[in-house]
Amino acid sequence: MHKPAVTAPQGWDPNAEASALRTLNTFAVDLIGIPNSDDLFWYVAQNVVGRLNFVDCVIYQANTEGTDLQQVAAWGEKNPFGRSILNPLVIPFGQGITGQVAKTQEAIIIEDLLTDRNYIPDTQVARSEICVPLISHGRVVGVIDCEHPAPNAFGEAELEILSTIAAITGAKLELLAEAERSTQRYQELVTSHAQLTQEIAARKALEAKLFEVRKLEALGRLTGRFAHEFNNILTVILGNLEFLEFGTNDPESLGFLNDAKLAGGRGSRLMRDMLAFAQRTRLEPVVLDINALVTEFSLTHKGDLARDVDLRLAQDLWLVSADRKAMETVLFNLVENAKDATAMGGKVVIQTENIFHTLAENSNLSAALPAGRYVRLTVSDTGTGIPEQRLSQVFDPFFTTKPIGTGTGLGLSMVQGFTQQSGGGVTCKSEIGLGSRFQVCLPALPERGNHSLTKSG
């Protein structure tokens, strides 16, 4: 940082010169610890100019457009309020002596202000004035202005001292501006890195979801094709078994035929579940009251449940449009899972409720749903629970936590397939030792009064 040499003019007091050098030396040392431009301006006004026998000092700062100067620090009678300026003066570039210095970037000494047409009188009229520009990166960023009540108060010595102060101050302003730019660039880099990290994470999540969707789509096409073909074969087999049953009275043969028919029936149900998983089932939607469906189900299967099921049904439940038989199968599969989970003890609860679904809740569902009114059917238990690492697999076809030889492994896959084909979604939450909760959301019909209910049975 270049600093003009300070030399005392002829006849200047040597003690004053030594004091000025000490003040400037202290200023150069203290510069390192000054953190911002506001502190710098006040330090210059109070601790530098104020100690160099200038009875008055005002520092102006230029705006970023380089059109106006505003008072930001002062010393002397014009500053009786410490580090606070009331109603700071604003001077346009080119106006008055201070504005002329800002415009021309040249220092000036006025020996007698009464003879200068550019002088703008203050509340306390001065007779002489010295004014030097603060320059940073080739542009005026401020002005140091000193006035005196007597004429001819400033000479070459004061101009040289004030110019040195201005040069040091301008250099420090450049360092502060560069530090601010560096901090801003660092913050921009941190922000960009955070955004990039989020975008990468979002892309990976989207790629994983896309892979899962494509996998299920391919599996669904294969499953649907297979189920259709195999269902045709089972139809022929079951039909011929019935013909054979009519053609024999042998008890042993009838027993074999009955076992074959039972196995064929299980195979037929499996094919229907596969079609539901593949979303290839031909649904026949009707207006349904889920409350009535649940009530009838609990009465019909009371003997199969082996324990009471706690029903918590909402009043004035909205109606839905869904295939009745498929909805009964959904309920049956969910309750069967809950019953198996509570075989060693526990409670099963079936709950219905009206909800307003928001887009923020889509992350919990098997498929994203539009925001709006939905009916939610919840089947929960206080049984064994499902390990966290297996929760993401519960809707996969043929995945089961049941022992070998029990269950088909397609019950929950069918639930997911049916609800998605019906415009809804399903979610599962579980914790070991605390139980599981399955929730099925189906779109609610707009108005209850405009729909007629189907009869039970």
Image: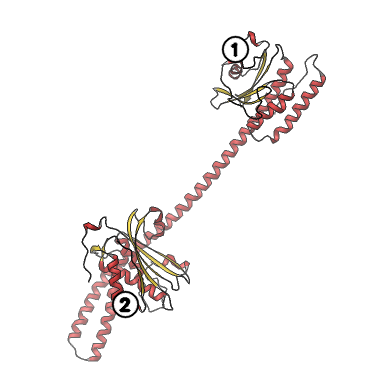
Please indicate whether residue 455 sits to the left or right of residue 305 in the image. Answer: left
In the image, which disc is placed on residue 16?
Answer: none
Pinpoint residue 61: horizontal percent, then vertical percent.
60, 25
Pinpoint residue 384: horizontal percent, then vertical percent.
45, 73
Q: What is the three-letter code of the residue carrying label 2?
A: Lys
Q: Is residue 94 above or below residue 352?
A: above
**Looking at the image, is mark 1 or mark 2 earlier in the sequence?**
1
Q: Is residue 100 above or below residue 35?
A: above
- Answer with the quarter of the image where residue 438 lies: bottom left
Give the secondary structure at mark 2. Answer: helix
Please indicate whether residue 299 sits to the left or right of residue 167 in the image. Answer: left
Query: What's the residue at 58%, 41% (across, down)?
Result: 186
Q: Is residue 442 above or below residue 94?
A: below
- Mark 1 — residue? 118
Mark 1 or mark 2, whichever is nearer to me: 2
Query: What's the residue at 79%, 24% (across, down)?
Result: 19
Residue 226 visible? The answer is no
Pinpoint residue 146: horizontal percent, then vertical percent.
67, 19
- Answer with the quarter of the image where residue 190 lies: top right
Q: In terms of depth relative to the viewer, which is nearer, 334 or 249?
A: 334
- Mark 2 — residue? 302
Q: Residue furthest top?
A: 115
Q: What is the three-letter code of the residue carrying label 1?
A: Asn
Q: In terms of depth relative to the viewer, which is nearer, 280 or 421?
A: 421
Give the secondary structure at mark 1. Answer: loop
